[in-house]
Image (cartoon, grey):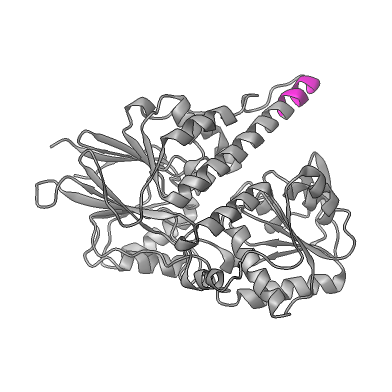
Amino acid sequence: MEETRLSFLGAARQVTGSSYLLESGPSRVLVDCGLHQERHFQARNWDRFLFDPGALDAVFLTHAHLDHCGLLPKLVREGFSGQILTTPASAEIAPIVLHDAARILEEDAAFKKKRHQKEGRRGPFPEVPLFTTADVDKVIPLIETVAYDEPVEFGNLSATFREAGHILGSAMIEVEMGRPGEPGFKTIVFSGDIGQSQRPLMREPSFFDNADFAVMESTYGDRAHEDKGRLDNLLADVINDTVEKGGNIVIPTFAVDRAQELMFFLSRLFDDKRIPSLRTFLDSPMAVEITAVYERHREDLDEEARALFRSGRDPFRFPGLKFVRTREESKAVNSIKGSCIIMAGSGMCTGGRIKHHLARNISRSESTVLFVGFQAKGTLGRLILDGAPQVRIFRQTFPVRARIAQIHGFSAHADRPALIGWVGHFKKPLRRLFLVHGDEDVLESLAAELRKDKGRDVVVPGPGETFSLD
């Protein structure tokens, strides 16, 4: 029997860029094809793939966050023409996310080229976009949907997509290699991003009784989400304190899941009169589009959200909420008098409309910048969160005087106790557990903890490293 190999092409000793090549017999599949988003790893997006894209049979996509799907246009441009298999909701979200990224890349490339010509220099990256909207258009026809819990046969592989509870459409992928009962048969589980349990909107993440190998994300492998279960109180406190001072609440917001979860909580707080009636702006055309996908795929939401829809109440709408689409509408937000809530992307403040709102508010002591999502090293969001006394936005330096707050419990990722519990659910010890999708020190910390229990074989793979699964 031919060797079965697993190669780690991204999210290896880093958080973003998830991508794993599985070669089993004649079958070659890629699990995720994500963008490297940390500033010090972005150059890797321009590297040639460590395999021939044209020789791939398929891509299994766990979900539609950019760090999992963002290099698909480059993959197709360089020769991939097979199927991209994913859940129905992810099949709708991925094109929205990719088109938005392409537009930003095109605008950034044009701006940098103009600036560098004026300054007579070259930047660290090519002055062309990593991919274009035309590249994205070639990806979309390759996307095919797979229902949850229904195995799909692919060569000598069988893949089953299970609920991950992370964002709408997110999946863990259970892959069987070979045929049960035959020599060499084995299973591997790719966790994708594991969601928190008992989160609003999302269904519970899946557990597995048996597998030979597992690849598990470890974003929050070094901490517990101590504030989960108190999100209503924490959010209300931040809003009420800021309103008392007469400032704005500026929330860097991921368009997929975080925006919808925030609207769910805000709707409940307004209904219960726990916060004053405020103008609230979702300043993200992409988040507006994604919200419509959530409303169409309510069957993938949890029972509480489905019950609200059945009662005639949309959990993503409430009085005072305005969906901001155009640039003119976005600029008008900054002329509002009195306190308001501004949710805008990007979630790590690396681009998008949030930078304009930060420029107007970060030096105002009465305003609050509230982080509700993970901030990768090297991003503007991380700099602010780590206490930088001043930051550069649009080539201008701003002193940081606004209150900087963070609520961990909004995270769509499982924390350390939940990750340990996920591994502990396997009835038989895994032959090997691979930890990915985390900062290096976090991965090593979690690996050391997991090795204490029954001497587990836990590996933290490096970029480009390949392992035999035989």
Reply above or below: 142 against 216. Answer: above
Q: Was residue 78 drawn as part of the magenta stretch in this picture?
A: no
Residue 430 placement (x, y as % from top left): 25, 59
Which residue is pictured at 47% across the width and 52% down the height?
Answer: 89
Observer able to see residue 20: no
Horizontal side of 345 relative to 401 (left or right) equals left
Camera-side residue: 13 or 337?
337
Observer able to see residue 69: yes
Horizontal side of 108 relative to 97 (left or right) equals right
Residue 56 placement (x, y as % from top left): 33, 31
Q: Quadrant of the C terminus?
A: top left
Which residue is pictured at 23% across the width and 67% down the height?
Answer: 427
Reply above or below: 121 against 185. Answer: above
Which residue is pictured at 45% across the width and 70% down the height?
Answer: 197
User: Magenta residues: mostly which secondary structure?
Assistant: helix
Q: Quadrant of the N terminus?
A: top left
Which residue is pictured at 22% across the width and 38% down the height?
Answer: 155
Camera-side residue: 182 or 450?
182
Residue 86 placement (x, y as % from top left): 40, 46
Residue 205 placement (x, y as % from top left): 40, 64
Question: Which portion, as a residue range, is magenta?
Answer: 112-119
Reply above or below: 77 against 345. Answer: above
Horizontal side of 310 relative to 108 (left or right) equals left
Horizontal side of 146 relative to 97 (left or right) equals left
